[in-house]
């Protein structure tokens, strides 16, 4: 038998039993099940899980209607089955398995929770997970979903959750974030954050059971009720749909493009998008992409601006991920980029031609004419080139272009003014010379 630590027991009319299970544990660092993920070659997930779990225990212990146990309070190896057996032996209402995440390409970030796909284990797990996720959002953690995952046998994929179903103990796996990813490490990779996470976890559980701190309640019941599935709650197994990418504008001055990505997702939610110039279509991996950009989960399209390489020889590939890391790619061929570049260049020529002719009775007529053809109404001049913007399409950096535009126009006026002043100065100089000669 393992030594399990009994933390606190408060006599109550009605109480819940929560078992906190710090993930992993043990000395064998070659064994991922013992060390957990190893971050930056020195931070061990098994240790971080324990810090968060202890903070969770301490916070939860301040609620009278709850009894808290931990599956381990130090570094020791425990099998998944023994963890759940222990929870069963203390008649746990829920067991929370505390983890931090990692991915092969180190690209993913955000917080996710896994529950069983079956029966009351699903209902309780999803309800508690919803409350915990809401607390995490307060801390700014991106929501990567409350999910189920099935193995090839059709049962729950994760052993600890599967044993939970076998023993009728709802088990959830809470993954606070990816400490191998720079974005998540920045907000989560320190002692304070590990503790904060445990406090938020505890408050999420308290929210779920309607517990009040330092107040004994006569009776308690889950505040979020979720129906058990008739068979099982299937995870999302389909890629994002309806993907399309539009190149909105090209800027020769800094060799960048504005783009808009459209996509839809029905079973789960869209999570990130990435862009690569390097990948061979059909062979690109997660690591080929730039830093993934969070998809605003309320939107069906996202806009942005990126620089192009000096010599773009390959197609641009955009990738959209959903919360299950299933993805869809969209190739923007080099031809499409060339068309945007040519459009910008021919707009420059058209504008130059009109400026040279300069026979408009009304100075603004030329611009109106162009915008009438759904082309740009703005032109900007920079270092001898003129770029045309396309305000008829969605752009993220519209303000950027118009700012450049006005400062560049101001510069032109300044140059003209200096030019005129120099001519006048030369004329005055000659007049003075002539006058002096006459006087002599
Ligand atoms: Zn883990």
Image (cartoon, grey):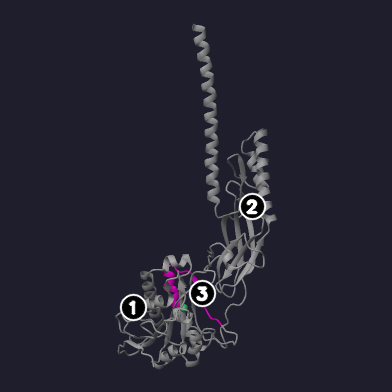
- Farthest residue, direction top: 440
Mark 1, ligand 1, within 8 Å: the answer is no
| Contact, mark 3 vs mark 1 (Cβ under 8 Å) | no
How many numbered circles does the render carry?
3
Magenta stretch containing residue 27, yes or no? no
424, 317: nearer the viewer: 317
Q: Say which label, 3 or 2, has the lower sequence index.
A: 3
Distance in Å between CA atoms under marks 3 and 1: 25 Å
Does 143 sit above or below residue 161? above
Magenta stretch containing residue 136, yes or no? yes
Tell me, for residue 145, which label it has, or none. 3
Q: Describe the element under mark 2 as helix, strand or loop.
A: loop
Does 112 sit above or below residue 341? below
Looking at the rendering, which quadrant does residue 153 occupy?
Answer: bottom right
Q: Describe the element under mark 3 as helix, strand or loop.
A: strand
Looking at the rendering, which quadrant does residue 333 occupy?
Answer: bottom right
Spot occupied by residue 11 in the image (x, y as percentages of width and height): 30, 90
Distance in Å between CA atoms under marks 3 and 2: 39 Å
Q: Describe the element under mark 1 as helix, strand or loop.
A: helix
For image coordinates 44% across by 67% down, the residue present is 185
Q: Say which label, 3 or 1, has the lower sequence index.
A: 1
Spot occupied by residue 424 in the image (x, y as percentages of width and height): 53, 22
Spot occupied by residue 428 in the image (x, y as percentages of width and height): 51, 18
Q: Say which label, 1 or 2, has the lower sequence index.
A: 1
Looking at the image, residue 160 sits to the left or right of residue 302; the answer is left
Q: Which residues are magenta?
A: 130-149
For image coordinates 59% across by 67% down, the residue present is 320
Mark yes or no: residue 212 visible.
no
Which one is closest to the eye, mark 3 or mark 2?
A: 2
Distance in Å between CA atoms under marks 1 and 2: 56 Å
| Contact, mark 3 vs mark 2 (Cβ under 8 Å) | no
Task: Find disc 1 in the rendering and name its residue.
Answer: 59
């Amino acid at each position: 038998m393992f030594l399990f630590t009994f933390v606190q027991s408060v006599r109550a009319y009605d109480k819940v039993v929560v078992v906190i299970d710090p993930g992993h544990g043990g000395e064998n660092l070659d064994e991922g099940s013992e060390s957990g993920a190893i971050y930056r070659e020195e931070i061990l997930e098994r240790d971080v899980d324990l810090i968060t779990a202890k903070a969770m225990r301490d916070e939860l212990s301040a609620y009278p209607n709850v009894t808290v146990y931990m599956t381990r309070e130090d570094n020791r190896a425990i099998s998944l089955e023994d963890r759940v057996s222990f929870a069963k032996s203390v008649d746990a209402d829920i067991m929370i398995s505390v983890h931090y995440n990692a991915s092969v390409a180190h690209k993913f970030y955000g917080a996710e929770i896994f529950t069983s796909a079956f029966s009351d284990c699903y209902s309780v797990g999803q309800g508690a997970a919803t409350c915990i996720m809401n607390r995490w959002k307060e801390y700014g953690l991106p929501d990567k979903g409350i999910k189920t995952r099935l193995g090839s046998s059709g049962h729950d994929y994760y052993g600890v959750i599967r044993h939970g179903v076998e023993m009728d103990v709802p088990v959830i796996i809470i993954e606070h974030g990816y400490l191998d990813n720079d974005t998540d490490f920045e907000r989560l990779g320190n002692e304070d954050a590990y503790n904060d996470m445990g406090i938020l976890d505890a408050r999420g559980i308290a929210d779920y059971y309607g517990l009040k701190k330092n107040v004994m309640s006569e009776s308690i019941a889950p505040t979020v009720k979720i129906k058990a599935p008739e068979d099982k709650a299937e995870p999302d197994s389909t890629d994002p749909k309806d993907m399309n990418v539009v190149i909105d504008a090209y800027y020769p001055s800094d060799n960048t493009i504005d783009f808009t990505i459209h996509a839809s997702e029905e079973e789960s939610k869209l999570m990130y998008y990435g862009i690569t110039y390097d990948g061979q279509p059909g062979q690109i991996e997660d690591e080929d992409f730039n830093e993934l950009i969070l998809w605003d989960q309320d939107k069906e399209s996202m806009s942005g601006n990126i620089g192009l390489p000096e010599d773009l020889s390959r197609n641009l590939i955009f990738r959209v991920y959903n919360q299950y890391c299933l993805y869809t790619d969209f190739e923007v061929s080099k031809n499409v980029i060339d068309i945007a570049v040519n459009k910008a260049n021919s707009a420059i020529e058209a504008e130059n031609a009109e400026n040279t002719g300069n026979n408009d009775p009304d100075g603004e007529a030329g611009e109106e004419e162009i915008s009438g053809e759904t082309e740009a109404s703005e032109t900007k001049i920079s270092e001898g080139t003129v770029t045309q913007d396309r305000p008829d399409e969605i752009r993220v950096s519209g303000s950027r272009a118009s700012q450049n535009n006005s400062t560049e126009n101001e510069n032109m006026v300044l140059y003209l003014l200096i030019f005129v002043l120099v001519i006048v100065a030369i004329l005055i100089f000659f007049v003075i010379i002539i006058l002096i000669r006459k006087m002599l």
